[in-house]
Amino acid sequence: MFKIIFVFISFLVGSCISTPSINQNSPAPVPTPEENTDKNATASMLVALSFDDGPNNTITPKMLDILEEHGVPASFFVIGQYINDSSAKQMQRAVALGCEIQNHSYTHTYMTQLSTESFKDEIERTDDLVEKYVSTRPAYFRPPYINHNPSMHAAIDHTFISGVGCQDWEANRTAQMRYDDLMAKVQDGDIILLHDFEGNVNTVEALKMIIPELKKRGFTMVTVSELFKRKGVTPKDGYIYTNVLQETPYQNR
């Protein structure tokens, strides 16, 4: 009798604590945002494309066509004496595409050879023209020939910009040479320096290769001002920037 009762109780207890069956048709758990993050993602890798020596109605629009095709912005450092009612349309188109217009002086001269009053005038005249046509004033300045000194830094209320280039002002350098040179050294935080002056067709062709390769390597292209912002860098007076993560004192280079 006791043996029968013991077996019956064991059966009941076993039924209560048995492991429930798994429904093979149940959906898989939804990963959390942390689990769903690609650890190899490179969205934080940023560079800024920039162009010197425009605007004009031949090369500048070709650069804009390529930027528009690939959906990327750039910063155009313009020379004031080249801005007029006609060329200003290229600046306006650039802004409409998400680009920005910055200052590259009025006459593209060696500014360290000018008086303080003269180089301030170079900046003001160009700033005024940019504001006239696109309704914003430049906050960044690239000195012609990257020629600068302490007096300029003290007198000009702009962040000084240099850049990583590929000597694309030299006519004998092919598009492939320009591309190879630039892509061998580009890194996160760089300000890429190219030129959109009249006749610079090899850089137009190089740009067609540069943008896709930058994307392939995981770089996002932004404007110079956005590069500082997204990298959390506040520009400092008395410095010139080739890479926003690396500060270079005003020493002439």
Image (cartoon, grey):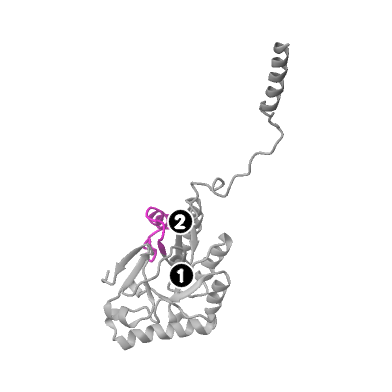
Q: Position of residue 237 (x, y in %)?
A: 33, 75
Q: Is residue 189 magenta?
A: yes
Q: Please tell me which residue is depicted at 47% across the width and 51% down the height of the picture.
A: 217
Q: Quadrant of the N terminus?
A: top right
Which residue occupies 50% across, 72% down?
Answer: 100
Residue 39 location, x and y as percent?
49, 46
Q: Is residue 19 above or below residue 225?
A: above
Q: How dense is the environment of label 2, judged by Cα within 10 Å: few (below 14), some, or many (20 and up)?
A: some
Mark 1 closeness class: few <14, some 14–19, many ≥20 residues within 10 Å: some
Rendered image: mark on residue 45: 2
Give the position of the C terminus as an image quadrant.
Answer: bottom left
Q: Main secondary structure of the magenta part?
A: loop
Between 49 and 47, the one lying in front of the other is 47
Q: Which mark is residue 225?
A: 1
Identify residue type, mark 2. Met
Q: Which residues are magenta?
A: 165-192
Under tag 2, what secondary structure?
A: loop
Looking at the image, is mark 2 or mark 1 earlier in the sequence?
Answer: 2
Give left or right: position of 246 versus 30.
Answer: left
